[in-house]
Image (cartoon, rainbow, N blue to C red):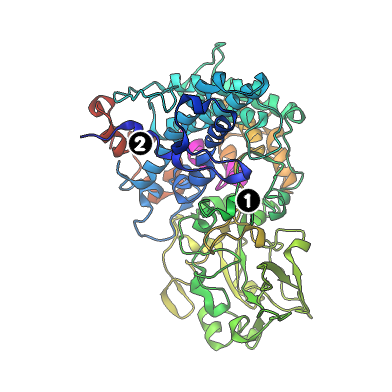
Amino acid sequence: MKKNIYKLACIGAVLAFNACSLDPYDPNKVTGDEKLTERETFEGLVNQCYTPLFNALYQSSDYVLFAEGGTDLWEEPTRSDSYQRYHSYDGLLPGDGYLKKVWRFSMNTIAICNSVCERAENAEGLTEAEREEMVAQARCLRAFYYYILTEQFGDVALTLKGTGTGEVDLYPTRSSVAEIYAQIIADLKYAVEKLPVSFSNYGRVTRKTAKGLLCRAYIQGAAYGLKDEDGVDYLQKAYDTATDFIAHKDEYNAYLYNDFADVFNEKNNRNNKEFLFVATGAKKDSEAYNSGNYSQCEVFRHFLPKLGEYTDLGLVDKTSNFIYGRPNSNVFLPSKYLMECFAQDMNDTRFRYSFITAYSGYSIAARGDEFAYGNGQNYSKVIDDKLIDTYEIDSRWKGTTIYEHFELINNGTDELGVWKPDGSGYINQKDTEGNILHPALPLAHPVEGEDWQYCIYCSLEKLTDEERAEYPCFVNNIFDLYDAEGVAKTTTDFGNNSASTRQTSIYPALSKFNMPGEEFYGLNAQRKTVDMPIMRFAEVYLIAAEAAVRLGKTDAKQYIDVLRTRAHASEAPANIDMEYIYDEYARELCGEYSRWYLLKRNHAFEARLSKYNKRAAANFRADRDYLRPIPQEFLDAIYNAEEFGQNPGY
């Protein structure tokens, strides 16, 4: 007998949302409609609409592979088949676990959002303004989840019925993309009108969230040639909405940092002023964190290289790296194209503040001890003949000590310190200006009177052998990672070792979601409690520029230059084309769950993969890979699976 689809629809509902001090809603305690009219329970139902954000979609590797994998920006570091179903469109099946997770959480929570909209009228003790605000939150989030489902899976079933009605649709029918987008736009327009500029809890969706998502929905929906209810096509609407948002940003409390260095500074992760929409992590010692059922973020570690391969240089192995996090899931290696985007302007600070390129070790003081700096081979490393031979370090540095840069302060708080250059003491991270993972680039040479504290330097500028010799550490030229076709190598002939993995196992690691310090330590080294940006205001400037170029307007430069100026990069050219738009999206938003959508809406996979990701291009099929397969468990649960149908090619 087939499973009841209603049971599937309730899987996500039993996951309590604990972030941001929102009270969890437990459906098992709901006795019926009467219970759901009570204010406290209804508020819990609203809170439940946020469940998938941190607890699923922005928690681990699944959705980020949907949104960034298989594009021109990333490759899988190894030639295994672990993630090739997403990176290279090789072997994705309807039973895939990642498919089920993204589908389940989105579909399940849409049903909860629907319930909020249906039941708001009967909820007790609410003012009309409160009622409208709660419905607006649910509709804003419903639009977001439908956006994901429609772009990833195509013409899914559009339903506005909530859970708990007793009605189970075992014969769902597909709705057209046009119908779904009409509902998405209607929901977001309502949310823009009814949501407040801010809540006391910044994890809530607000007016700027809805406005930003409306820009995103218009630009994405333009791929289908859609028109809004007033007859204006979506592309023009994207331009109008984005430029209006920018012109009236103060009215929405939208903000763009003046310097890109501030955007992903760990000091600004909580209550980040540029984030329009955020999945909030639980603060340490909060009720949500201590409850034990809060899903912490692991996304950062999927961008880390194999740091455990370099313990001979002083890096900490994969099981206990409390600075960078546990690097045991190497999923995303930046493509040659992405690195070339940054190399076009070495003054562009977005590379420095988006990637870790200079890696360091750390020390741990024995409890009660003040310092542990340079405490033997456990922490510091002395360059000997073996290291010189293995890493092609110049022999002049024999006997030089590579000291640790970080100090894990073992005083019961697990706070983080940064050692002073002369080793005389450390500065608590709380007393720094932040960005402690990002030294100035190019990395400075050794300074007399200061200790050297970097194990590995991945240089974006290609250094000659003579220039590499100026550093007492392993210097890896980033562009040596790739072969003549731009494909990431698996081994190289390096030093006296043939088929070595020394060069290919270390690379720049995206650090946008990697916040160091005591505040962000999770339950172990592979989890952190960061706030994850879902959309930030910079994307609106890119949408305005993209729409301008596609409409043949001449003002794209003014929106691009705002972003380039704050990154200390040169001005954009006078005549911006889509190639430049792709490059600028890469420099500004790499890793931020947007690239797959950008390529899809511009029908650009074929051309860009063949040029910049040949491994993916070899398997990509335009008649199949613009969509994912419908999860098999959903088809098994309905009675009209054959009529509903699988997506083409699967």
Q: Which residue is mark 1?
A: 344
Q: Amino acid at mark 2?
A: Leu
In the depicted structure, whether residue 220 falls above or below residue 23: above
Q: Nearer the viewer, residue 475 or 358?
A: 358
- Quadrant of the rendered structure where residue 605 is? top left
Magenta residue span: 583-601
Whether 227 is among the magenta residues is no
Q: Is residue 581 left or right of residue 196?
A: left
Cα distance between the residues tagged 2 and 1: 49 Å
Q: Amino acid at mark 1?
A: Gln
What numbered label is drawn on residue 8?
A: 2
What numbered label is drawn on residue 320?
A: none
Q: Secondary structure at mark 2?
A: helix
Task: Give coordinates of residue 465: x percent, y percent.
Answer: 59, 73
The mark that comes first in sequence, 2 or 1, is 2
Q: Quadrant of the N terminus?
A: top left
